[in-house]
Amino acid sequence: MGSPSLKPTRSDPHVDQEETDDPRRGARLFPGSRIDTVVTAPADFPSGKKGDVLSVDFTLMGQKFSGLNGGPYFKFNEAVSFTIPCENQAEVDRYWKALSAVPEAEQCGWVKDRFGLS
């Protein structure tokens, strides 16, 4: 019997309506990244309106994710972190500058963006 193979895992963060632009920023910043699908509400609903983004399927550095709009009840939190492989300090500095929301509170390449994703 052969050894079991590990299947890739994925994390699908919940986001608020205002945070649905974050995958677009990541798609521009990271190589091998793109927005795959954006699903919007076809009509008004109790916690939103027609055209609100409900989910965003995106690829970030070759890995697929789905950002789900959790609305006002399921807030985004730090339960999701991404590790970005970097070749050198210059690359770390470039990502840090592009993503950092609170540079004075961060160190050693650990970054928290404006939505709390670290």
Image (cartoon, grey):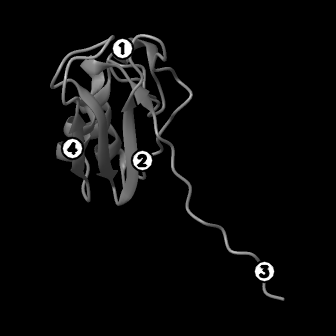
Along the polypeptide, which appears first: circle 4 or circle 1?
Answer: 4
Residue type at mark 2?
Answer: Ile
Residue at figure coordinates x 20%, y 38% from the top left: 24
Give me the C-alpha separation between circle 2 and circle 1.
Answer: 18 Å
Determine whether 43 is above or below 72 in the image. below
Q: Residue beneath label 4, please?
A: 29
Relative to residue 60, is residue 53 drawn left or right?
left
Q: Percent from the top left, x then y, of residue 106?
A: 45, 20
Q: Is residue 8 visible?
A: yes
Within-10-Å neighbours for mark 2: few <14, some 14–19, many 20+: few
Q: Residue beneath label 2, please?
A: 84
Q: Number of callouts in the render?
A: 4
Q: Which mark is residue 102?
A: 1
Along the polypeptide, which appears first: circle 3 or circle 1?
Answer: 3
Task: Determine which quarter of the picture holds residue 117.
Answer: top left
Q: Which mark is residue 112?
A: none
Within-10-Å neighbours for mark 3: few <14, some 14–19, many 20+: few
Within-10-Å neighbours for mark 4: few <14, some 14–19, many 20+: some
